[in-house]
Image (spheres, helix red, strand yellow):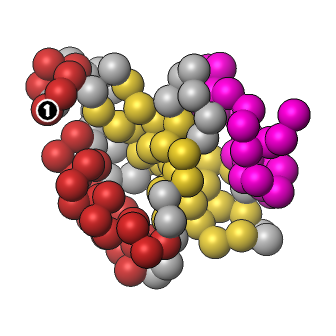
Amino acid sequence: MDPAHRIVTQLPLTELRSGEGVLDARSAEAVGGVEIERLLRDHSTFVVADVGKPLKWISEADRFAFWKAEVKDRLVSRDTDSFCLDDYAGGYCYVATVWRGASCAPVIVLEMHH
């Protein structure tokens, strides 16, 4: 099966895949809004992990608009141990981590909860 079409079966992710296969990257740390804005300025991008769906990579050209319109108001604080979906618009939210590897730029992984 094409790695780009593999379905996310559990969170947190244990590996990060693109159309080219498994990336040599590992989850490094939880991140919040300030860190995400810095990472975006440094050319990082998003990938959305939603159980039951393939990973959704956000293009570099769309990353700022996606941040502002979709993620910013639905981001769970990085130091929060629990959250209530009703506190977020649309009843869903994102938990963000940055993944780092020797052979790729940092990637902001957004685990979607709904």
Q: Is residue 82 above or below residue 42?
A: above
In the image, is 32 to the left or to the right of 61?
Answer: left
Q: Which residue in the protein does label 1 denote?
A: 89
Residue found farthest to the bottom: 42
Assign the N terminus to one quadrant of the image. Answer: top right
Amino acid type of the residue tagged 1 in the rendering: Ala
Where residue 96 sits, quadrant-wise, is top left
Instruction: Confirm whether residue 70 shows in the render.
Output: yes
Q: Residue at x 14, y 19 (%)?
A: 86
In the image, is 98 to the left or to the right of 78?
Answer: right
Q: Is residue 114 above or below residue 107?
A: above
Q: Position of residue 72 (x, y in %)?
A: 22, 52
Assign the C terminus to one quadrant of the image. Answer: top left
In the image, is 15 to the left or to the right of 84?
Answer: right
Q: Residue at x 22, y 60 (%)?
A: 68
Q: Position of residue 12 (x, y in %)?
A: 57, 29
Segment tinted magenta in the rendering: 1-24
Q: Residue at x 59, y 66 (%)?
A: 106
Instruction: Assign the magenta stretch its main secondary structure.
Output: loop
Number of residues whose C-alpha sits closer than 10 Å to that of mark 1, classed few (under 14), some (14–19) or many (20 or more): few
Number of numbered discs on residues: 1
Q: Residue at x 35, y 37 (%)?
A: 94
Q: Position of residue 79 (x, y in %)?
A: 31, 40
Instruction: Confirm whether residue 35 shows in the render.
Output: no
Q: Residue 19 or 25: which is nearer the viewer?
A: 19
Q: Residue 20 or 106: which is nearer the viewer?
A: 20
* Element type at mark 1: helix
In the image, is 52 to the left or to the right of 89?
Answer: right
Q: Is residue 12 above or below residue 16?
A: above
Q: Position of residue 51 (x, y in %)?
A: 54, 23
**Residue 73 highlighted magenta (yes or no):** no
